[in-house]
Amino acid sequence: RQMCIRDREEKYPEIVQKSLDSDMNMPTDKDMDTMPDSGSKDNKTDGGSTGSTPDNGSTGNKTDSGSTGKTTDDSSLPKFPAFEGKDLDGNTVKSSDLFSGKAVTVVNFWFTTCGPCVGELGDLDALNKKLSGKGGALIGINAFTLDGNEAAISDAKDVLTQSGATYQNVYFDSGSEAGKFVENIYAYPTTYVVNRSGRIVGDPIVGAITSKAQADALQAQIDKALAADMG
């Protein structure tokens, strides 16, 4: 099982059906009770926006197949929502500095009681080490830690330590643009690739990279972003 589904059956019937067929992992009631309040469930973004609930067939956050990053105008790519927050050790983190300083940044959304999320932490840490040698980085955003929830931060740090994951995890205000972006993520883990301009490259990778399909798809997007940065 590669992911935890967050939203209701009436909103994502196909996804829920897959979960019932054991292709995906539904969170427990406890998980649902402890997820951050996402407010309205009807605030799904339209195609073309930076929302994180892509429909099948939606091209809203896809890159053009001929896109080559620096050699073309990437202004058509959706922007990852700007944020100013902190890492789990209390250090200030600004997205503008974070993205501009790296050739590529992989952003992984997870939460502490999501089994597939925790299961991929070791692989993500290995990926971060690999990226660091290429001018890139990986960061985590734990949905439970938004607004600086101290108990959630402590739990997240414990899980990361137990998994041997040392890459940076950050949080920000739930009411911010980035916080609203998190509200619209319906499945965990979900991973984005962001270029130096702070723009999203390709579609989000939904599901853990412990699956070869997800791992290969993520690597392809990373390679595209790195090639564009060099170009």
Image (tube, rainbow, N blue to C red):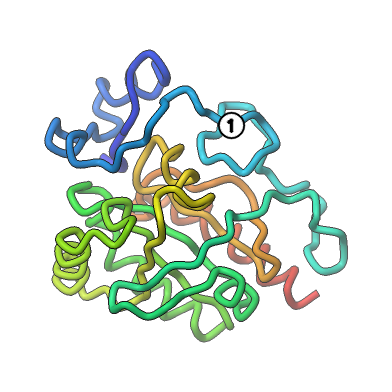
Q: Quadrant of residue 24?
A: top left
Residue depicted at x 65% and y 76%: 100
How many C-alpha atoms fall within 10 Å of the one at disc 1: few (<14), some, or many (≥20)?
some
Q: Is residue 131 above or below residue 117?
A: below
**x and y percentages locating residue 134 in the rendered image:** 57, 82
Nearer to us in this view, 176 or 41: 176
**x and y percentages locating residue 28 in the rendered image:** 15, 33
Quadrant containing the N terminus is top left
Quadrant containing the C terminus is bottom right
As shown in the figure, which amino acid type bears the numbered disc 1?
A: Thr
**x and y percentages locating residue 49 in the rendered image:** 66, 39
| 59 sits to left or right of 171 | right
Nearer to us in this view, 12 or 122: 12
Tally the marks.
1
| 126 sits to left or right of 98 | left
Q: Is residue 66 above or below residue 25?
A: below
Residue depicted at x 61% and y 71%: 96
Residue depicted at x 52% and y 41%: 52
For label 1, the residue is: 45
| 112 sits to left or right of 230 | left
**x and y percentages locating residue 129 in the rendered image:** 41, 80
